[in-house]
Image (tube, helix red, strand yellow):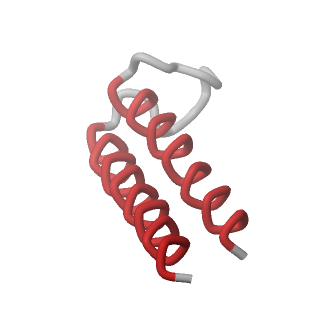
Amino acid sequence: MRTIGYVIGLLMIVLGLIWIGQGSGYFPYPASSFMIAQKIWMLWGAILVVAGMVVMVSISRLRRRG
């Protein structure tokens, strides 16, 4: 169960970083993406990165207790 939590947290962080990159225009792939240079996706990406970190920290704390 902890491994699944770590994988989900890591995927959230990676996806959030991709969204930040597309929203800022630094990662314009695919070229037809509606997310490119749209600032709102930078915000959603940052929120997803923070949520992923919260998941990973929570899983880490559960590991120490159990």
Q: Residue at x 50, y 77 (%)?
A: 62
Q: State the image quarter where residue 38 is shown.
A: top left
Q: Quadrant of residue 66?
A: bottom right
Tell whether 23 sits left or right of 40.
Answer: right
Is 27 rendered above or below residue 6? above
Q: Is residue 26 above or below residue 54?
A: above
Taking the view exactly as shown, the residue that stands out farthest to the front is: 65
Q: Quadrant of the N terminus?
A: bottom right
**Which residue is outermost to the bottom?**
66
Task: State the image coordinates of residue 56 (x, y, percent, origin top left).
Answer: 48, 60
Is 29 placed above or below 9 here? above
> Residue at left 49%, top 20%?
27
Q: How many marks?
A: 0
Write the residue at 40% across / 50% down.
Answer: 49
Question: Residue 4 appears at what percent x and percent y?
Answer: 71, 67
**Residue drawn at the location 35% of the way across and 28% of the way down:** 37
Give left or right: position of 40 versus 15.
Answer: left
Give the image quarter of residue 15. Answer: top right
Q: Is residue 9 above or below residue 2?
A: above
Q: Provide residue 13's location: percent of width, then percent of height.
A: 49, 47
Return the x and y of residue 53 as percentages of the image width and height.
40, 56
